[in-house]
Image (cartoon, rainbow, N blue to C red):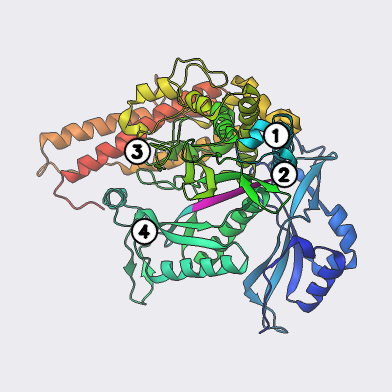
Amino acid sequence: MRELIYFIPPEKHDSETLRNILSQHNEIRFVSLMGIDLGGNATDEKIPIELFLDDIEGFLAHGAQTDGSSVVLHEIAVLNNAKVDIIPDRDTNWIIDYNWDNIQEETSLPVGTLRLPAFLVHNGKTVDSRSILKNAVENFKTNVMKLMIKYPEAAKSIGINSPEEIDKIVLTAATELEFWVKTPDDKADIEKLSTSQQLKEQYWKRTQGTVRTALEKTISYMEKYNLEPEMGHKEVGGVRSGIGSNGSSNHVMEQLEIDWKYSTALQAADNELLAKEIVRDIFRHYELEVTFLAKPIEGVAGSGEHTHVGAAAKLKNGKTKNIFTPRDMGRDYLSTIGYGAIMGILKNYEVINPFVAPSNSAFNRLKPGFEAPVCIVCCLGHTVDNPSRNRSVLVGLIRDMYNEYATRFEVRSPNPHSNTYLVMACLYQSMLDGITAAITSGKSESELELELSKNAGTPGFYLDKDRAYRSEMDVFEHFSPDERNKIFGMPPATVWENMRNLDIYKDKKNVLLNENVFTNEIVNSFKAANISKWETELQSRIIPMNIEIVRACTKIHHSDTATDLDDAMWYKINNIRIELMKDSLDKKSLFTNIREALNNKEYELASSLQQEMTLKMDEIRDLYSIYKRNLFEAVE
């Protein structure tokens, strides 16, 4: 078997080199264009390689066409104007996706598909997630360079004598992928999972059996695709699996994390999609189910996808300067540009958050007590020479006193279903807004630190007066819920509230619209798609699932062994059951009221009722668990 190739780098995307590569690898039988819609979904199609070879230049220039009404481009690609062109991107890695279940007889090799990341074009305009991120990157680099030329002190604050020394600005990014894996048909035991999580029984423990094999194979394949994996390990969630009679693992219910090396922003987002596909394919091969939901199991840890963003200046002499690192690391946490960047994220987070958390699952994760951020707050470190990792904040500063290149920001709110292309585009637009304010203010690094560290109620030149934005304390332990909401702002509680912020915070939304990186058309399309998804999930998935939970809460105590406590507990439980799902002639249940509010497009009411339903469902789960503990009868 000859050696397979797994990716083709940008410098080999000319027609002559491509023909040569493909002629030597006739196991590559198809071409696929991978456009990313506003929902973060990647298109995939099977175009015979012969059609690609017949007219490579024409294909690369014009791509293919599709029916855009079938992807997430709400209010853009509509039924009577649905044509969308998919145009290949020649400036990023192309990967070969092998089907190991389809081995060619003539070569004994798996059938490969050459996948080309691409842009979606509608009515002559790009409307896809990749193009938005590409434009955000170019806007950031262009305008930061302009600012340093106009305000040379900004360059001096990072140890560059003159902006004339700078060749270009380079953006780097990386994500950390958490996910749950389980054997099919196994159901979660919430109490066992919760207990194991509290005891830290799984965190960083040795993997075993098929999970270990699948994890090791995943990391090996990531290396073949040049993702440069750095680590794979168990996360905090999960319980120990068993061994079946055939020697394979059973009752698998584990949370894992995989990390890989940073790259340019667009390549980092492409790499994340590839990593997910590798994980799915390999774990499925070992008969294990994978989910990237933010909160697949209520009551235990959800899955995050911490997003790291950095920026550097490539100098004409070949050296590199991290533009977030201050000239004197022993005196300042950040440079002027670094302070501006983190303040920009915090100031504009109300309009970043809709792109970070557009789903019900995302909001189920963002709850106090599970190391998921709910407050718009950052940490820098307890002292300049004592970097810290505060896991309770939204944005953390990562720095190393002995490595100036390590300085970057970790945004802790995204999850594996967040659209990383749009999340990073929002971050870069917001950072640029803050950088512009910081540089043009003429304030020193120490003055900018005071602004970032101000108390709620203290006016700032850029940050909102009524908010505080920095805490080195555990914000869940140090502040009560009311204090958090007062100091850091009231977070949205539902998808509807989150999407509504795009209308409430018009000035902040304009930051996203700067230089047409986002457009009103794109923002409205994204908002409409996710409100529709929220509505459909609530009606057709969440309420039916809750109905099954309510129906499963049955009376199980027997009169000959019951106590008055059993009767009292069942009385409480049954009243909640009735309130949630039982209609009468004169009163409608909570489930019915939610359905009717959605049918009438009364989204504000539906959002409020959803919050009430969530509290009631939490209450009935807890009560029923307590009720079962007091029974002699064995209960599954």
Up-down relation of residue 292 to residue 597 (above or below): below
Is 608 left or right of 321, judged from the image as shown? left
Q: Measured from the top left, where is residue 400 in percent x and y? A: 47, 48
Three-letter residue code for mark 2: Ile
Mark 1 — residue?
A: 148
Q: Measured from the top left, where is residue 295 in percent x and y? A: 44, 45
What is the magenta range? 166-177
* Alpha carbons under labels 1 and 3: distance apart: 42 Å
Mark 3 — residue?
A: 369
* Alpha carbons under labels 1 and 2: distance apart: 10 Å
In terms of secondary structure, where does tag 1 sit? helix
Mark 3 crowd level (few <14, some 14–19, many ≥20, 10 Å Cα) = some
At a point 43% along the width and 38% down the height, the residue shown is 384
In terms of secondary structure, where does tag 2 sit? strand
Up-down relation of residue 57 to residue 221 (above or below): above
Q: Residue 169 magenta-drawn?
A: yes
Mark 4 — residue?
A: 204
Task: Specify whether residue 426 is in view.
Answer: no
* Alpha carbons under labels 3 and 2: distance apart: 45 Å
Task: Specify whether residue 619 is in view.
Answer: yes
Mark 2 — residue?
A: 166
Q: Are marks 2 and 4 in contact (CB under 8 Å)?
A: no
Three-letter residue code for mark 3: Gly
Q: Are marks 1 and 2 in contact (CB under 8 Å)?
A: yes
N-terminal of the pair, mark 3 or mark 4, is 4
N-terminal of the pair, mark 1 or mark 4, is 1
In terms of secondary structure, where does tag 3 sit? loop
Is 289 left or right of 315, judged from the image as shown? left
